[in-house]
Image (cartoon, coloured by chain):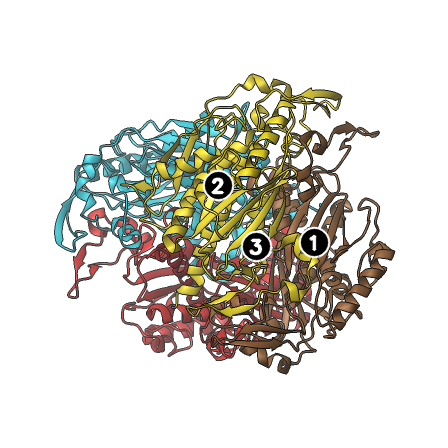
Chain colours: A brown, B yellow, C cyan, D red
């Protein structure tokens, strides 16, 4: 259970890190949408390991193959299946992990829950699982773009103590892609890269914050009560590996304001639209998008797998030392950027279909 | 849509603030569990308006009535329906709101989405909806308690700039209930109460942070990938009115640590159990509970409805001024404490049933 | 679990026969639809006990009350809750049933599954549960009528050995309502009524078949593979009490035809529409409605509760005799007609929303 | 949408007849269950085309490959993915079908709904989709067998006018597999085979009825109200291609009995168990299994694709003649037997997990 996301635009991922294949099925995609492997590969390339000197050296090309749901370049309205074959893996790197649990990793909880796990490369808990999310997100983004030219742009806002200054209303995708760390503040970006390189040398890892802005957000997405748009966004990004925190709009900082400071005053703009002067709400009010930019932030911890010697235990309940040999990222952030993009796209696309169902059927 | 929460322990709330009734249906509750209206009323009393000088003066006793699913004091395994009748409401307070949208409230987005809304007391977007959640949570807590003596204790951690020092491993429910603000740090609690009283005098509102600890957490709850336990907890609390941020364990602070600092070292305790030395993970690793205390924090903004004059617009697209007359809370936190308790209980209870289904059927 | 039906137009029923209340919540209804208690009561009156000499003498007026989701006579898009209070019940009629299981009733399986049951009037397994379905169906029918003037007409096709001759393409609702048994073949209807009266005198019960026709069916409803429209219709009516069989179009009779006889030849009608000459498909091909009339039949067994002396067992595992004293219907069919109407309406309305979501969002 | 079945044991199929691959994902399978490709292949071989002279001559070996979810021969508790590559297909056979709609096939409704379809071999509506169901069913059967030695045996009960006499309580799997038509009444089986051969020569098709018996059925499966076990079984088999009717226990024949004839008298057997003398209920009472054999029947129409010349229309709305050239089955029944087995196994396995969740968590 737990491998499916979304109510109408339904995404199911599958596959283990060192199994033969990872992939995704998307059910509920609107028919007659143009989709090609190129659309998907673009995003997978942003996620793939081995893309730069600040990511893991595992070198997967992550070539995707669409094996169902497309006919003559168009979606059929039936399940779209996308496969990526695992290629560059050394299971011998993981022999020690068959028995020793990495601290703060999924190893021990999987073993405790299921009494079995694929300990090669993290198995199902590996970030390779997110290939399916990113592939599905590429399709969701196409639906959103076609519907309303919706733009979803994530970027690295903070790495450890280094915080960038970025204007989410103005930033472009090209600016994000302009450097290895995907931080559109060039000066801070360079410092971030240096910090990650140093961390890598130390066999350690560091974390940070990714911010995501949604522009041209449709109005009216999100549902009262449990399926508020921010609730589903929170779930979406908190399901990514290594995420520890979520904020929308003013977030935790908003707790330091009074209501009169925090409230986003309404006004009528020049073309007669209702707008808000400020956007502490982060584009969502009462759980429903108001058409302003949606802005969220996700905190990622330093990843658990490090090359330093650590104390841990074995499956036989012995206390031992462990020094991980598997290749891993010193900082998950640059590769997590397309993951956040994808998860936000999946939530919006699903809610777009839900809105269409309930609010347009009799209009 | 969006009014149901949970996969197996399924909770559906209904009702508008100034409609006749609010309530909840719980489907999937284990049979033969002892439940009485007293169990539920205890939690509803902690949530009800008018409970103290720092909450809204709307005075509802919120007496609950169980109208289905219980027989001779025991659950039948069929849907449990709980009703609370609305009593103390003045619809005339809201006449102005039929036309003017409160800034940062759900008014405008509901109107935009549905082309209709019950503008009396916020209708469905009112915090009265959470009565159903708290009632359902009381039952979920009984299931969890009976299963493993699970304890769920939420408390106010921060009000605006005032932050309490609290040890989540030691705190008691009685300490939480010891003062009006539900902050088990008595000195800071008094300052918080004064600050809220001042805010109330100013016709303004303030926010803060609620922390929740789960003790005796069962191991193995949560599912890989999308339904990670922290993802479902995030969704749960981010669906509460006025919430703007969520953290688990180290949260945003964890982004400032290195992996070697952040990782929770495993050891074997005196009775042979695998434990962790630190708990930066917040009781969840790889999306699955590890038996350590689960610790989450939720940020609540200052609530939108304030007595101060604000600029806004009308349904006829005119810019106007609005001074809200309805009774409201100057600070949502003391009443949000039982709401957080309830949402956490709903998530854990649902995942307990899911774990039982998949992992125990062949054992 | 199991008390919710539908994916987008979601209906949850609750309540026991002799509890305080039975009712329903409808989540996902389109907003701004005119709904009043009168719309719903009309259908409830067709279902209510005590409506004629051939139904049970339990005399419930089944007055419904809408307690949420409607504002100024229009749906809000939020959950609609409808309650009906149980009034005319004698729990003493059921004292014997606390211990003795009625043969072929739900008594024993409920007890075995849950180790508890409300044995008064069948508790949750009582046909009173269908009040919620009929109330929800009344709203679904309004959605369908507004969308495409969809007409759903069920009627009694067969009672025991008596089978009526009815043209589903022509029959009117008025003809159905023209007699107590709801069979629009007046001559056979009278024979059916006599047969039921005789059965009642004998303290026995009889069954039969209800046919349902959907006219002005929208094209394109139903989904490939598991959620074929006929599959969801089958589930819908097979979830009604006492149903034992389901057919669509040619049904079991179709197994006696060859493909060349069974296939429905396509042609172009005078106004240029694609139509079929015959309708062995029953309005659905490949799981998707083709715009022809949808025709289904449901078999209902004779109901289990009879006034004759029967052998059975007790909860203490003794073999005993039982003569039921509770009031019951000699034949479920006249009251099951509005239940079938309702279930068909729920399926179509749900699939209408699903079609709208997937197939109209980018058109 | 509509490509997923089950609530806890969740099965999603994907793939088109003449696309590269068809397959299935199973999410929610209990961990540590022994599964190999051999287990699955056994059932796929019973379903595969080209297996005998009375099936289609399309010759697919349908070799399955498990690409995720299994480690060292055991299930991991994470999604199991099974792929089958399509091999023996001639797309040229279908050129004519790109434009002409086969009568009573899914061609026209797919085109009408989605404005696009893969017209090669029926695309998604092809019976090749059922490969995924049969593969998943093989796993479900293993769970059920391990839980309670549950046996699920389907067989051909009727082909056109030829009806076999079979005792569902005694029949063995070997007897079913003893002849090409899978009818364990050898004399009638031969007549059925002859009739199908004649039909094949005539380029026509015929239908019939499959009966399925479940022995050692666990008690307590099925849920009150909408998810009654027979309702879910009805949906399951009515989602199979070409099915037109469903019966449980006495079925349509039961409408000719009185309650006193139909009721299944309870008694205590020699080892103290509550049993029923007769089994008109078909093993389910009040929607919940009672431990007696579950017996259902499914009617299959003659399949739509025939080699005879038929009138139809084109996508350009012209009336034309069509003579199908694609290879197809003269009678779907022998290959539908493992499909019914699989669907019944999926329903029971899902309900087993549901029962485990709700009824065992506090026991």
Task: In this rendered view, identify the residue nearer to me: B334 or B25.
Answer: B334
Q: Give the vertical position of B49 relative to C299 (above or below).
A: above
- Badge 2 and badge 3 in a common chain: yes
Q: Position of residue B248 (x, y in %)?
A: 59, 53
For residue D61, the mark is: none
Q: Which residue is mark 2?
A: B176
3D distance between C-alphas at marks 2 and 3: 24 Å
Q: Residue A288's quadrant in the figure?
A: top right
3D distance between C-alphas at marks 3 and 1: 24 Å
Identify the subunit bearing mark 2. Answer: B
Q: Give the vertical position of D138 relative to B221 (above or below).
A: below
Q: Nearer the viewer, mark 2 or mark 1?
A: 2
Identify the subunit bearing mark 3. Answer: B
- Furthest residue in direction top, as rendered: B92
Q: Nearer the viewer, mark 3 or mark 1?
A: 3
3D distance between C-alphas at marks 2 and 1: 45 Å
Quadrant (top left/top right/bottom left/bottom right) for the C terminus of chain D: bottom left
């Amino acid at each position: 259970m737990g491998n499916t996301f979304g109510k109408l635009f339904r995404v199911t991922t599958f596959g283990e890190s060192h199994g033969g294949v990872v992939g995704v099925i998307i059910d509920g995609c609107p028919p007659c949408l143009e989709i090609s492997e190129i659309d998907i590969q673009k995003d997978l390339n942003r996620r793939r390991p081995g893309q730069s000197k600040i990511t893991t050296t595992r070198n997967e090309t992550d070539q995707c193959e669409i094996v169902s749901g497309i006919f003559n370049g168009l979606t059929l309205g039936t399940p779209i299946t996308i496969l990526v074959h695992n290629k560059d893996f050394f299971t011998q790197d993981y022999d020690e992990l068959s028995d020793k649990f990495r601290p703060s990793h999924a190893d021990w909880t999987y073993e405790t829950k299921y009494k079995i796990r694929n300990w090669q490369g993290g198995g199902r808990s590996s970030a390779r699982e997110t290939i399916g999310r990113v592939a599905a997100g590429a399709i969701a983004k196409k639906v959103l773009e076609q519907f309303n030219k919706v733009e979803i742009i994530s970027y690295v806002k903070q790495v450890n103590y280094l915080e960038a200054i970025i204007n989410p209303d103005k930033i472009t995708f090209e600016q994000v892609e302009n450097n290895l760390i995907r931080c559109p503040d060039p000066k801070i970006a360079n410092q971030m890269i240096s910090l990650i390189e140093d961390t890598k040398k130390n066999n350690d890892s560091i974390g940070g914050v990714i911010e995501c802005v949604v522009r041209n957000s449709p109005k009216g997405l999100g549902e009262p009560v449990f399926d508020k748009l921010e609730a589903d966004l929170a779930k979406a990004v908190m399901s990514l590996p290594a995420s520890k925190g979520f904020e929308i709009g003013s977030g935790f900082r908003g707790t330091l304001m009074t209501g009169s400071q925090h409230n986003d005053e309404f006004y009528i703009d020049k073309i007669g639209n209702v707008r808000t002067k400020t956007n502490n709400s982060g584009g969502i009010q009462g759980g429903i998008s108001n058409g302003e930019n949606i802005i969220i932030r996700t905190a990622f911890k330093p990843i658990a797998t490090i090359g330093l010697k650590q104390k841990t235990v074995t499956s036989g309940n012995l206390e031992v030392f462990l020094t991980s040999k598997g290749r891993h990222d010193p900082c998950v952030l640059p590769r997590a950027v397309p993951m956040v993009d994808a998860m936000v796209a999946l939530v919006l696309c699903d809610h777009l279909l839900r809105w269409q169902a309930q609010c347009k059927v009799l209009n």
